[in-house]
Image: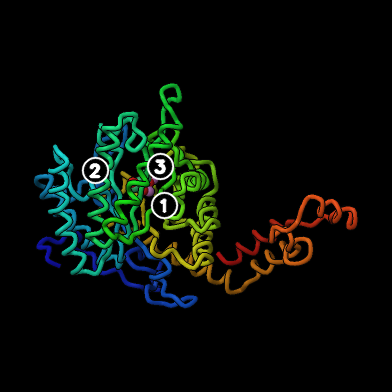
Amino acid sequence: MAAAEEFFPGIARIQYEPSAGPGDVLCFKHYNADEVLMGRTMEDWLRFSVCYWHSFCGTGADPFGFQTLHRPWNEGTPMESAKKRLHAAFEFFTKLGVKYYTFHDRDMAPEGSTLEESNKNLDEITDLALQLQNQTGVKVLWVTCNLFAHPRYMNGAATNPDCHVLAYAGAQVKKGLDVAKKLGAENFVFWGGREGFLSIHNTDVAAELNHMAAFFKMAVKYKEKIGAKFQFLIEPKPKEPCRHQYDYDAMSVIGFLKHYGLDSHFKLNIEPNHTTLAGHSYEHDIVMASAFGMLGSVDSNTGSPDLGWDTDQFPMDIRNVTMVMKTIIEQGGLQPGGLNFDAKVRRESTDLEDLFIAHVGAMDAFARGLRNAVRIIEDGIVSEMMKKRYSSFSHGFGLKVVEGSSSLEDMEAFIKQNGEPKITSGKQEKYELIFNHYI
Ligand code: XLS
Ligand code: NI
Ligand code: NI
């Protein structure tokens, strides 16, 4: 590495040490990158990614308290610290052994006082990013534009009532797409934090949704024009900072995309903490998006079920990650998406090593989830039970339903001939018990 300064002294490359004890936290006990499971390496199934905004820009400040995390890379002018931050980040990726990272345009380089200045800053810092990517082999999982922090976006970006603001967002996304192409990003994310409303009284919902669709169509067109190959992803979230966000959950986004004929151009980036904010179970949107062939990537984190906001904690719950990995294996993997840790260390976790411990813990949790899911799938007990549960649709009248060749008249005739269906147990507890066997 070209970095003169070491930001994480005393921490070496994290190794796989399966027999390490409970107190050994700077090693993997389960994640063995090169180990092959069901025909693929663990690294390939998991496609881990570190996020820039929480891990390298996070300060620990919350609405009630000041900065608690003082990082050695936050020194000098904004451009100087942007460069230091990049070196620190690449040292971190390499020591952790993660091959992907994600960032917002504005966490990579500071916003200037004009669009031209912001773009110039971005060009300079992404030149360095490209150099570090080439040196280390670390790649960009996705890029996104920050269309929510600047005051101009307080009433939304693509759904702003003022088309001047929409134009600014468009200009920013144009540059974001260029940057994503320059760095070889594999995906590009849209998260609409302020695409929604606080009050229905001042909001023309139909107009705003039309504008948002028009905005996405322009992005699709520009992506095609520059010949970029990355996958577009929309990240649903029901609220925060808006009271109501249009991209509420997986099914709302899928409905929106299909309504506007955009579904072949986008997939979904599902963040489980957003899913639980929408009132669903942890794995709900991952399963729903996957069922529609729309699960593109995962912002791997977790919330506190007793709190009503996006706490962005590192995913450590083995049951949850086993469910996620089972869905991912069943759909044949996440590529070109990945498991991006959109998670932050607590503001009380102030040591630099806590950043490593958090990622190591989450990666090991996912490695266990992967191993568990592989056993569930390879044993085939659950899938056999499921197959049996739906077996009436594999022949006769059920098959006609599946093929779309039955009618209500057929159903009436079927019932007249066969009478009352028999009561069949759903066996929920049996499924739960078997699932627990694997975790
Ligand atoms: C916020 C979102 C955000 C997106 C990227 O809640 O998770 O961090 O992932 O803009
Ligand atoms: Ni996210
Ligand atoms: Ni989030």
Q: Residues within 10 Å of mark 2 (few under 14, many from 20)?
A: few
Quarter of the picture holding the N terminus: bottom left
Dot 2 amino acid type: Ala
Q: How far apart are marks 2 and 3 (CA)?
A: 16 Å
388 vs 28, left or right, is right
Dot 1 amino acid type: Asn
Quadrant for residue 402, please give it.
Answer: bottom right
Image height of 285 relative to 402, above or below: above
Identify residue for label 2.
171
Q: Does the residue labelled 1 lie within 8 Å of ligand 3?
A: yes
N-term mark: 2 or 3: 2
Q: Name the mark on residue 301.
A: 1
16 vs 118, left or right, is right
Image height of 157 relative to 47, above or below: above
N-term mark: 1 or 2: 2
Mark 1: secondary structure? loop
Image height of 266 relative to 169, above or below: below
